Amino acid sequence: MLTLGVTGAFHEPAAVLVEDGHIVAALEGDEARQKDKGAAAVHEPGPAWPTESISWCLARRGIALADVDHIAYGWDPLLVAPAATLPEQTKARAPGKESWWATLPLGAIDWVRHCVDVRSAEASLSGGDSSSRPVWHAVAHQQAHAAATYLTSPFDNAAILCVNARGEQASTTYGLGQGFAIETIGKVDAAHSLGLLFEQVTRHLGFTPGSGEDKVSALAAGGKPRFRAAFRDIVIRAPNTAQYTVASEELGERLGPPRIPGMPIEARHEDIACSLQECLNETVVGLADWLKHQTGARHLTAGGGVFRNALLNSALRDAGLFERLWISPIAGAAGTAVGAALWVDHTLRRSATHAAVEHTCWGPQFTAEEIEAVLARAHLAYGRPPAITVAVAARLASGKTVGWFQGAMEFGREALGSRLVLAAPTLPAMAGALADVTGRDGFEPVACAVAATAVGDWFEDVRAAPFRSFVARVRADKRPRIPAATHVDGTARVQTVGRAVQPLFHDVIEAFGALTGVPILLSADFATRGRMRACSPADAIEAYASSPLDALALGPFLLQKDR
């Protein structure tokens, strides 16, 4: 059975193709991959349907839309709460764009966009032939998050906690997964949202909501929780319950004036971020504790955009409430395309099992012949070293930054081995060099990738972390050896890499370790300043040529600027 999962009414449009419970292709739309695009205007009309991503998924499998049995859409507009019940942040629209569209009830907006998108997509993908249309399924947003979380996990019995900005009726849901079944056991109304509060504070601190939350978490490490009381007044949760409320109020009255974008970061801003992070941690850990007692489950799966926060995930891990914890590697809105497809597939096939996800590399990949043809058209000088991993490791050890373009592209926010910018953690200046390439702020920590067999030698109390979902404390005696990877609080955001899942990336880490004694690399998304993640060889070449990158490993080929 072939099921096409899609999302796209708001931000992060994406498409995925599932065949009998297995993900065979997945690709986010251009708007979802566009660097620094926030979600501030999600209720404005405009094309967001991932038509190109759908076309690519179909082509990857060699089929037409008529061959698809079902289409699963990660949003059910018929469930949308009336605008009066939603928080002010959700109802707000971009200033200066008031029109007839702004006068429609929120549910009507969703319904109109839903119908227009569906019909236009069907027409463009089927060539106007309506004789054979797949069966359409609207899957509730939180249900899609729950499915994306549980049905990609290694568990066949687990509690499910989903926290995001909002769904049609809820911002937080609690569930229990058993076999193929997912039971919802509670929810928090959309009018109260931890995700939207984080977005609101992100804006208050001068960053773009929807893309600047990582910057807020980075600031938290250098701050003190002196605004703890203010956030406890805003977020109120009675002990031993699943419910919390988020007060809608002007943040400036409690936190001081908002920071103007581009102005210097002050200690107050770090303290606000620290206090917000502490509030988020203690609230979500409390919710997880309630869920543990309600379900008696040994394992927890967690998803929704709020769980893109590695500090939160680490607090949940350190609380020790569950034997094992699975953080969805596709926690954001794009992941609901995967969840909707898996949910429809498992519900209709009544599959008793599901396959745990070991990677997210479901996107485009290119042969050496295809890559070389692009290089030839560009009239660029390049070489083909005997071992690309050894050649890259040597350049990294000499203090160079290297673009790494190998295999199938990752799906989701995190690049985990196929589309990366790499640098040496042993040289203090390399964190700044990586920030210069990618456009990150200097206070943002750079993630690192470590050979899975060596993780315990360098980091404290960390298990396998293949999806870069957690932070770990760097061992005190090792911090001087990896200064570029160690954040101001002595931690690092860690990805463990094994040869079985990412053989080339593992081998370049091992080769670097053989040269330096440090089997660790700095790694960032291959999205240079102002650009999307490099999807194609042409994307990678353009990013390399227009940025301070020193070298580019493009498949088996190596390009260098310092020949």
Image (cartoon, rainbow, N blue to C red):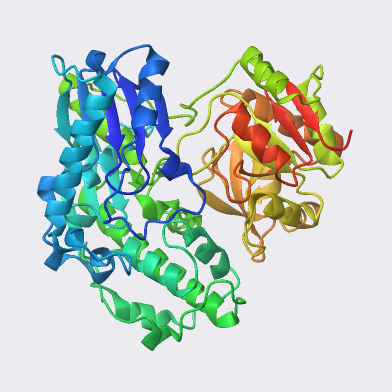
- Residue 297: where, in percent of width, then height? 28, 44
Residue 137 at least partly seen: yes
Q: Is residue 206 above or below residue 457?
A: below
- The one nearer the camera, 46 or 365, is 46
- Residue 390: where, in percent of width, then height? 80, 26
User: Residue at coordinates 23% horizontally, 45% vertically from top-left?
Assistant: 141
**Where is residue 454, by image quadrant?**
top right
User: Residue at coordinates 29% horizontally, 34% vertically from top-left?
Assistant: 6
**Where is residue 394, by image quadrant?**
top right
Q: Is residue 5 above or below residue 484?
A: above
- The one nearer the camera, 470 or 388, is 388
- The one nearer the camera, 364 or 341, is 364
Q: Is residue 342 left or right of residue 377?
A: left
- Picture quarter with the C terminus: top right
- Picture quarter with the N terminus: top left
Q: Is residue 216 above or below residue 400?
A: below
Q: Is residue 29 left or right of residue 160?
A: right
Q: Is residue 423 left or right of residue 275?
A: right
User: Residue at coordinates 61% horizontally, 40% vertically from top-left?
Assistant: 526
